Image: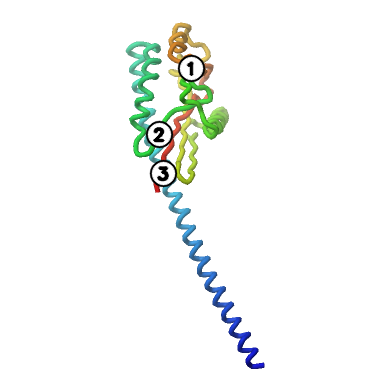
Amino acid sequence: MKAHLKIKSLALTLLLLSTASYSEVRSSELAIHKDNVSQEVVVNKQLENEAKEKVKVFATTLKQTLVSAIQTGGFENGVNICKDQAPQIAATLSTDGWQISRTSLKVRNTDNQASGWEIKNLKHFDSLFKQGVSATTLEASIQTQDTFRYMKAIPTDQICLACHGTSVDKTLQQIITAQYPEDAATGFTLDDIRGAFSLTKTITK
């Protein structure tokens, strides 16, 4: 009887030790997971800030270049500058694993066609904008194992309407069509989101 009790006691002790060990391991796993999640949040915020800075530089540089071109040679010159300079500015900023571009639901350059994720966000941006949400707050980001993506809405400004509005000058339209035979980027109003800056960052481990 005593031997039986000793065996039972030993089994209970082993069970308690096993449970304690499992609890310690589980606590350790949870702590590691928590650290990983916190680190991911930090990385996301850092990448988001980098993306915002690149958008700021791209938007400012492109607008200054375009306005200067229009003041010098009219909207016809603006079309040429936008076609040639915008890709160059984007290429200059596409460093350190970043790729920066612009896209829209109605693109002028077919190389800028939106992906599924971009289309979803563009429609969401436009819907919110029409409800009165400021375009400055319309942004989206997503991170996978090896890629971070960020989008920032571009509203339709008054200056955009000359080339992208509902009543583009016939001569100007001919110039646009000559440069972009498959142009679909017209018919916009001040109530529309013109498109978005779209950035992708390759994440290296």
Tell whether label 1 touches label 3 (CB within 8 Å): no
Tell whether label 2 touches label 1 (CB within 8 Å): no
> Callout 1, which amino acid?
His
Residue 101 at x, y percent in the picture: 42, 29
How far apart are labels 2 and 3 at the CA level? Answer: 12 Å
Viewer-nearest of labels 1 and 2? 2
In-front residue for pair 92/161: 92
Position of 118 compared to 81: left or right? Answer: right
Rendering quarter of residue 76: top left
> Could you tell me which residue is drawn at 54 percent across and 77 percent down?
17
Residue on which the image places disc 3: 203
Q: Please give the label number shown on residue 111.
A: none
Q: Is residue 191 above or below residue 12?
A: above
> Callout 2, which amino acid?
Gln
Residue on which the image places disc 1: 164
Residue on which the image places disc 2: 99
Mark 3 or 1 closer to N-term? 1
> Callout 3, which amino acid?
Ile
